[in-house]
Amino acid sequence: MENYSVVIFIMAIMIALSAVAKKINIPYPVLLIIAGIAIGFIPAVPEIVLNSEVVFLIFLPPLLYDAAFNISFQDFRTHLNTISTLAVGLVFLTTIGVAIVAHFIIPGMSWPLTFVLGAILSATDAVAAIGITKGLGLSHKTVTILEGESLVNDASALVAYRFAVAAVTGTAFVLWKATLHFAVLMSGGFVVGFVLGKTLAFVLKRVYGNPLVTVSLMLLAPFVAYLLAESFHVSGVIAVVIIGIGSSRFSDRVFPEQLKQQSKSFWDVIIFLLNGLIFILIGLEFPYVVKDVSNHKIWSLIGYSLIITVVALLIRMARVFLQKLNLQNTFKKRKQKIPREALLDFQTSVIISWSGMRGIVSLAIALGLPTKLENGTPFPMRSDIIFISVAVVLFTLIGQGLTLPWVVKRMSRIQK
């Protein structure tokens, strides 16, 4: 009962702070994270450990489903080149880049462990970026690219993470096997999402006159898609994204306007509560992570975290601007391959680069690290990896989060 009271208390604080943030003109995700850190250090507050399985089952499916449902399929297809570059190529590039830097700056961290750390921090959290920039007038193109990236990059990061952890346990890494496994996970998730989407459309046509049943089925859909895909050992993330896009296209053709408004109002409340809880829980985890690290190591780990944060940001900026040049060159040579709308300008490239914040997925993956290897020995440097991961998440969310509105306004002035 005590834990339930704490959860209700946290939700009440989250709602109140969201209102306060708007009044004092501070991005509400940043304010919630800071409040979470402060609450976590209160001795009377019982320890709340964020379970990675809870994050992937309770938080991730509805957030991905909502983003996929609301994204324009036509715009997604227009910017597919950039989205796939960021959601797949950049994820693996960041994994490698962070691993190389971590290997040389962190004493005693082996190559397999550095790749685990790189995989944990490879995926960005566009939910945080959109929440922070909401109301700042981001271009539709920028929002589409950021949300499109977040729909796919979690799946890429989870694949990289699984192979990195396997390497720590002694499993040999074979490139063609990893590539085949990645293809099977992605295509399998697509098939599960596609079949469930068709099934959902079939059922909804037969309960057309019952709005409560319709909305309830659409609420249940992302959880069913995720669990079913994971039971088949394919990507639950991709399955949720596909069924979300399919539901959106189906609803545009069939649902009456009144039902659309009812569904939107319901989902807006759900997404608001989930987002708020995510940010305050991220802050809450930091005090508990600190307890697992020796006092003499904390400042050195914070230093490593800051360096890795800067490296990850520089890698993202380099890749985004390289994508900008690639699109321009391809457009000049073969106009029919790249539409003009898909080109990136300088201002959009800067905003997308600066929006590369880490979030709940990185935190959940880190906290889900196994405590022991298959032979029973403790997972090496587990507490250090978790601390660095949480610190990088906080650095990006608070540091980039506080400055991102300024960057957006600055780029808007340059554009004018």
Image (tube, rainbow, N blue to C red):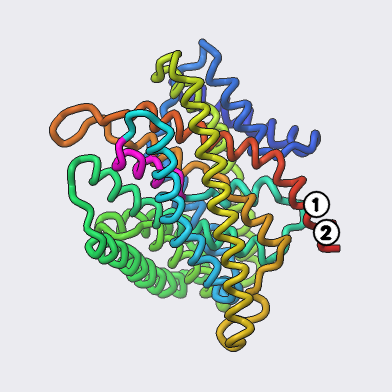
Say above or below: 182 vs 111: below
Q: Is residue 107 visible?
A: yes
Image-based side of 185 in relation to 145, left or right:
left
Q: Which of 84 and 69 is in front in this view?
A: 84
Where does label 2 land, which residue? 414
From this viewpoint, which residue is outermost toward the left? 375
Which label belongs to residue 410? 1
SS state under label 1: helix
x%, y% of residue 99? Answer: 39, 44
Q: Which residue is drawn at 45% across and 44% down?
A: 121
Three-letter code for the amino acid on which mark 2 is drawn: Ile
Seen at 27% across and 30% down, the residue is 380
Q: Give the range drawn in magenta.
A: 110-122
Q: What residue type is labelled 1?
A: Arg
Callout 1 touching callout 2 (CB < 8 Å): yes
Crowd class of label 1 (few under 14; some 14 to 19; many from 20; radius 10 Å): few
